Image (spheres, helix red, strand yellow):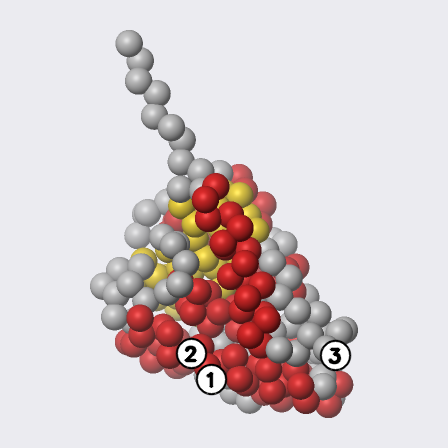
Amino acid sequence: MKIFSKKKRKAIVCIHGFGKRGPKEFDILRPFLEKNGYKVYIPQLFSLKNDQDTIWENWLHKAEACINQIQSEYDEIILIGFSMGGIIASYLANKAKVTKLILLAPAYEYISLDNVIGYIFKKSDPNEISSSFKDAFRDLVDNCKNSISDISIDTLIIHCEDDEVINISSSDKLFKKLKTNKKLMIKISEGQHRMLDDEKCGKLVIANILAYLKGEF
């Protein structure tokens, strides 16, 4: 008599950063995750076009609500956070039942907020973003960044050495704060902040993410 094991249902929640692209930050990565058997969810946390969408707690709640809605449907949920989304993912990893955490250039120590804004809008005037959005970004970072010390699950950090927005030294410090023994940091010698789209390193970053998910590290 053949015994059939039930195939595990796997999901990945991707959390975008403080940018106008929002969920589109994961457009290149998403097909690779889906080909490897993961259902991918990418909640829209806010809209820079909506001047009322400036409450950072609401950004957290939207990401958390996405996880809560699917939690009973999957045997395995993994969080991937890019830039500011890395901070949100770290915070939620302590609250939700997730198995792995992947942080892509997490924004724990940004070079300057004007630098972040200028990067998002391709060197445009930082004043184009309302002060409320800037304050929300700062407050989210300040209120959630210490949650990394409580992480107990498998954690991968990927950061490019030439990152022009978040210095790689930020992730070096972050890695040391992680109390879990199940941690790994990968430094990419070429490439910048938006690593998934970067022609120099994008394929390498995605290959490392997939290898990590498969347990090859």
- Choose the circle earlier in sequence order: 3 or 1: 3
Q: Amino acid at mark 2?
A: Lys
Q: Is residue 43 above or below residue 149?
A: above
For label 2, the crowd category at 10 Å Cα-Cα, with few meaning under 14, some 14 to 19 and many 20 or more, is: many
**Residue at figure coordinates x 34%, y 80% from the top left:** 173
User: Which image quadrant is residue 153 in?
Assistant: bottom left
Q: Which residue is mark 1?
A: 142
Q: Amino acid at mark 1?
A: Asp
- 45 sits left or right of 100 in the view: right
**Callout 3 secondary element:** loop
Instruction: Kindly identify which numbered label has been placed on residue 145.
Output: 2
Q: Percent position (x, y) of residue 30?
A: 57, 50
Q: Is residue 87 above or below residue 137?
A: above
For label 3, the crowd category at 10 Å Cα-Cα, with few meaning under 14, some 14 to 19 and many 20 or more, is: few
Q: Nearer the viewer, residue 113 or 3?
A: 3
- 78 sits left or right of 178 in the view: right
Give the mark toward the camera: 2 or 3: 3
Q: Percent position (x, y) of residue 1?
A: 28, 9
| Mark 1 touches mark 2? (CB < 8 Å) | yes
**Callout 2 secondary element:** helix
- 89 sits left or right of 132 in the view: left
Q: Amino acid at mark 3?
A: Asp
Question: Marks 2 and 3, Cα distance to the nearest angstrom?
Answer: 25 Å
- 50 sits left or right of 119 in the view: right
Q: Percent position (x, y) of residue 212?
A: 37, 52
Which residue, as the protein is rendered here, is positioned at the far left?
181
Q: Percent position (x, y) of residue 171?
A: 39, 75
Q: Which residue is mark 3?
A: 51
Residue 36 visible? The answer is no
**Residue at figure coordinates x 53%, y 84% from the top left:** 139
